[in-house]
Image (spheres, rainbow, N blue to C red):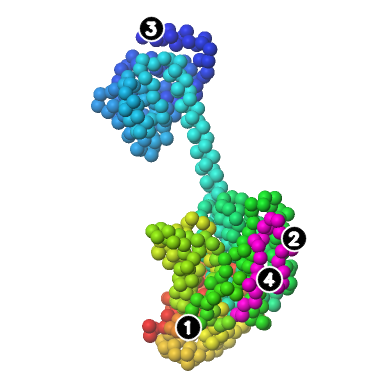
Amino acid sequence: MSVAVQDVVSDKAGIGFTQNLEGRVLVVDDELPNRLYLRKLLESRGCAVLDAEDGPAALELAKSQQPELILADVMMPGMDGFELCGRLKQDPRTAHILVIMVTAKSKIEDIETGFELGAMDYIRKPFNPRELILRVSNALALKKSNDALFLWKTRMSHELALAGSIQRSLFSNIPHFSPQFEVRSAYRSCMDVGGDALDVISLPGGKHCIYVADVSGHGVAPAMISSLLKATASEVIGRFADEGPSRICNELHTLIRQRIDNPSYYVTMFMALHDPNTRQWRCMNCGHPNPIVIRNGEVADSGLFSEGGGVPIGFPLVDEMPYRAKDEVVFANEGDTFLLLYTDGLSEARHSRTKEECSAHLGAVYRQVALDPAVSNKAVELMNILDKEQYELGEDDCTAISIHMVDPDKIVMERTVELDIHDVSDLSKEVEKLLEKRGITVQTAGLVRLLIMELGANLVDHSGLMSEDSFWIQVRVDGFVCQLVFIDEGMEWDIDWALTCDYDSEHLSDRGRGLVIANQIVDRIERYRVNPENITYCTLLDSQV
C-alpha cells in the first residue's frame, strides 16, 4: 500500500498528470485496501469520493447520492460488478450514471459483457494510476457534456412545445359559419411545430377567403415561415381581395422571396375566394394537391382545378409575378356540396401494413363523413377514421379543411332577431311549426322551441347587449338531424363556471338554468368565442330515430 501511495505522490510532478478533476465518484470494491487506495488517488486530483463494499450498498448510494461516475470491481462476492452494472442501468434513477468496470479478467468475452450491460469503459488490474486518472477524467468530461446536452435538449423541448402550442392557437379548429357555407378544420403537426398553415378570413360584403398551405421541409424554419405566411396573408388578402386570388398570390410570392433568402423553402397553397352574391368560388392552385369534391352524394372529378394554377409561392427561378387571372378556376357554390382542402401529409400517408398511400382512398373516406349529417367536424372525423384504419398520419404535417356548402332547401329558418323576449317567443313558435311541416316529430320540434326560448332569453337578459341589438340564427334539417346556429356579439361567458354556480344566486340563476336546460335538450352543443362573436352550434337527433 505504501508503494502505491508513493506512486501517487511522485506522479504529481509527471507531465500530463496534473489536471484537477471535478465530480463525485463511487468506488465499489469488497477489499478495503483497494477502496482506500482509489480514494486517496482520486481525492488527490479533486474528486469527491464515496465508497461501498458490495453491490447492494452501492445501489443505495447511487440512488441517494447520484454520483457522476462509478468504478465497480467485477470480482465481488454475492452481487458481482456485472450484476451491479445491469441493475444500475435498468433503474431510471441511476441509468444515467456512467460505469467503469475494474477487472482482472482479460478475456474479450468478459469485456464484451460489461459493455453489453451498459458500462462505458473498463480498466484491467493491475492498473497504472496515470491510466486510471485519464480514464476517469474522460468519463467525467463525458458526463459533464452529456448533462449539458440533456439540459439543452430539455430547454429546447420546452421551448418547442410552447412554440407549438402558440402555433396551434393560430391554426385553431374553431368552425366558421356563414349563411351559405360552414367550414371545419383539423390541424396536426408531426413535430412540436409544423409547416402547414390555414385560415378563414371574413371580408367586407359577406365575402370570404379560405386557404391551406404547406411549407417545404420540416422543423423550426418551415414552422416560422408558416407563421409568417399566416400573419402576412391576412394583411395581403384584406388589401387585394377585390382583385382576386392571382393578385394575392403574386403579392405573397414577392414577400416570401424578399424575406426568405433560401431557395430551398417555398410554399404550396390552395386559395379560394367566395362571393355570396354570385355564389361562386374563385380559386388559385399554387402547386398544391387538388381539392376533393363531393357532389350529388358522390366523389366528383376534381380535374377542373388542374386547368389553372401555377408554381408554389416563393419558388425560385420564376417570374416576379407568376400568377395570372386566367389561371384562376371558378367553382360554383352549389347547395349540399362538400369541398375538402388538404395538405399532402394526408394523401401521402402510408398504411402501416400494406404501405400503400392514402391518396386513392381519401375521397371515399371524405364521402363517408360528408354524407353523415350527425358528424359535426368532418375534417377531424376524417383524420380519426384514417387513424383507425392504420394510416401513418404522424409522418408529416396534416391539415384538412372541410367546406360544406349548405343546401338552401335544408334551411328551415335564417333570420336576424332583435333582443326582445316577445320576438324570441314568436320565433320559437314559428320554427316549431316549420319543423313539423318538414316531418320532424312533435316531441323534437317542441324541444327545439324550448331550446330557442332558453338560449334567446339568456341573450336578452344576460348578454350585455341593448334591446336594439340582435342575434343571428339559422335552423337546418338534414334527414333526421336538426341543427341550429346562434351568433351574437354579447359579452363572453364563462360557461364552465355558469354551469356549476349556485342556481339560486341573485344574478346568475336564470342563465345557469338556461344553460343546463340547453345542455339537456341537445345531443351535442358546441360553444366558441371568435371575437367579437359568440357562436353556439346545437345538434338534435329526431326522436323517431
Disc 3 crowd rating (10 Å Cα; few below 14, some 14-19, many 20+) is few
Image spot of residue 256 (x, y percent): 69, 57
Q: Which comes before the other along the chain, label 1 or label 3? A: 3
SS class, disc 3: helix
Cα distance in 3D space between marks 1 and 3: 96 Å
- Residue at the disc numbered 2: 320
Give the residue type that dot 1 points to: Asp
SS class, disc 2: loop
- Residue at the disc numbered 3: 2
Give the residue type that dot 4 points to: Asp
- Nearer the observer: mark 4 or 3; the answer is 4
Q: Going 44% across and 90% down the picture, which residue do you hit?
A: 439
Task: Return the residue found at the far left.
Answer: 78
Q: Going 42% across and 59% down the picture, which residue do you hit?
A: 355
Q: Which comes before the other along the chain, label 4 or label 3? A: 3
Image spot of residue 474 (x, y percent): 55, 81
Give the residue type that dot 3 points to: Ser
Cα distance in 3D space between marks 2 and 1: 48 Å
SS class, disc 1: strand
Image spot of residue 510 (x, y percent): 50, 75
- Nearer the observer: mark 2 or 1; the answer is 2
Q: Going 56% across and 85% down the picture, which residue do you hit?
A: 408
Q: Which mark is residue 478?
A: 1
Disc 1 crowd rating (10 Å Cα; few below 14, some 14-19, many 20+) is some
Cα distance in 3D space between marks 4 and 1: 36 Å
- Residue at the disc numbered 4: 327
Q: Which comes before the other along the chain, label 3 or label 2? A: 3
Disc 2 crowd rating (10 Å Cα; few below 14, some 14-19, many 20+) is few
Magenta segment range?
307-333
Q: Main secondary structure of the magenta part?
A: loop
Quarter of the figure with the C terminus? bottom left
